[in-house]
Image (cartoon, rainbow, N blue to C red):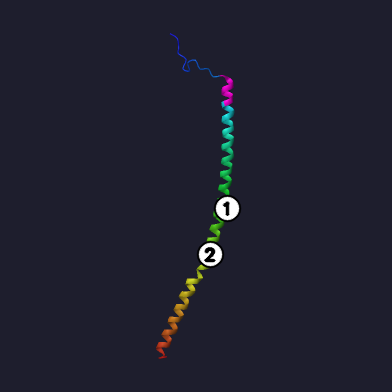
Amino acid sequence: MTQLDPLGPVTIGAREIYDQLLATDRKVDGIRGEVAQVAQAHGELTKDLADHEARIRALERGRWPLPSLAALVALASLILAVISFTRGG
C-alpha cells in the first residue's frame, strides 16, 4: 500500500515558507505599533480622568458651605421672628 500525499501534487518550498514568515513578521510589527499607540492614548486618558476627578472633588468641597449657610440664615430668621412675635413687636 502506498501512502497518499495530503497535498497531492502541490509542493511548498522553503522560499514560500520564508516569504510567509516575513509577511507575518511585518503584520506583527504593525500590530505592535498600534498597540503602543493605544497604550499611549490610554495613559493620556487616565491622566485626564484623574485631573477631572480632582477638579470635581475641589468643586464639591467648595459648594458644601452654601446649603449650610442657607440653613443657618433660615434658622436665624426663624429665631428673630419668634423673638419679635413673643415681644409683641
Toward which corner of the image does residue 3 lie, by quadrant?
top left
Residue 46 coordinates in the image, percent (x, y): 55, 51
Q: Which mark identifies residue 59?
A: 2
Amino acid on which disc 1 is placed: Lys
Question: Horizontal and vertical percent for residue 1?
Answer: 43, 8
Residue at screen point 59% across, 46% down: 40
Q: Nearer the viewer, residue 86 or 13?
A: 13
- Point 54% across, 57% down: residue: 52
Residue bounds of the magenta highlight: 13-19
Viewer-closest of 42 and 62 = 42
Question: How would you rate the neighbour count of disc 1 (Cα within 10 Å): few for under 14, some for 14-19, many for 20 or more?
Answer: few
Q: Is residue 5 above or below residue 68?
A: above
Q: Relative to residue 79, is residue 23 depicted above or below? A: above
| Magenta stretch holds residue 15 | yes
Secondary structure state at the residue bearing disc 1: helix
Residue 47 is tagged as 1
Q: Amino acid at mark 2?
A: Leu
**50 versus 58 height, above or below:** above
Task: Identify which residue, 81 or 8, lies in the foreground.
Answer: 8
56 and 19: which is toward the camera: 19
Where, by quadrant of the figure, is residue 74 drawn?
Answer: bottom left
Residue 49 on the magenta segment: no
In the rendered image, the residue lying farthest to the front is 9
Q: Residue at x 58, y 50 (%)?
A: 44
Q: Residue 65: horizontal and vertical position, in percent? A: 51, 71
Compared with 7, 52 (above or below) is below
